[in-house]
Image (spheres, helix red, strand yellow):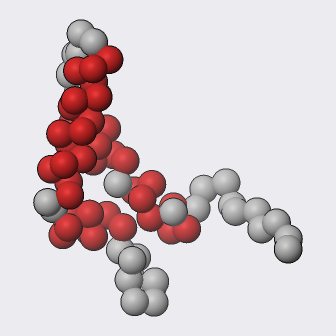
Amino acid sequence: MGLVFLPPYSPELQPVERVWPLVDAAVANGQVETEEELWARAEARCAYLQTQPGLIRSHTLFHWWPGGC
């Protein structure tokens, strides 16, 4: 067993990293009064994104990735 160190910036090795802006935009662009409200917004956005596989695919699919993501 050995360690494999990733480059400092390697989004293609963690495709979900490219999805975070889709969540952040809905959560960060507003003001919340409580932590519960913040979590409710994040949960609602994630629930919406689950219904949008094409949108997720467009952010995580790398043309060179064998078989896509």
Q: Residue at x 29, y 29 (%)?
A: 39
Q: Position of residue 35 (x, y in %)?
A: 32, 17
Q: Position of residue 59 (x, y in %)?
A: 31, 64
Image quarter of residue 13: bottom right
Q: Pick whichever, 46 or 24, lies toward us.
A: 46
Residue extending farthest top:
33
Looking at the image, residue 39 sits to the left or right of residue 52; the answer is right
Q: Is residue 55 left or right of residue 8?
A: left
- Residue 35 in sight here: yes
Tell me residue 20's x, y (percent). 37, 47
Name the image quarter holding the N terminus: bottom right
Q: Quadrant of residue 10?
A: bottom right
Visible in this render: residue 25? no
In front: 2, or 55?
2
- Side of 33 relative to 3 (left or right): left
Q: Residue at x 19, y 48 (%)?
A: 47
Can you say which quadrant of the picture contains the C terminus? bottom left
Residue under the point 31% across and 38% down: 24
Judge whether 31 appears above or below 10 on screen.
Answer: above
Picture quadrant of residue 61:
bottom left
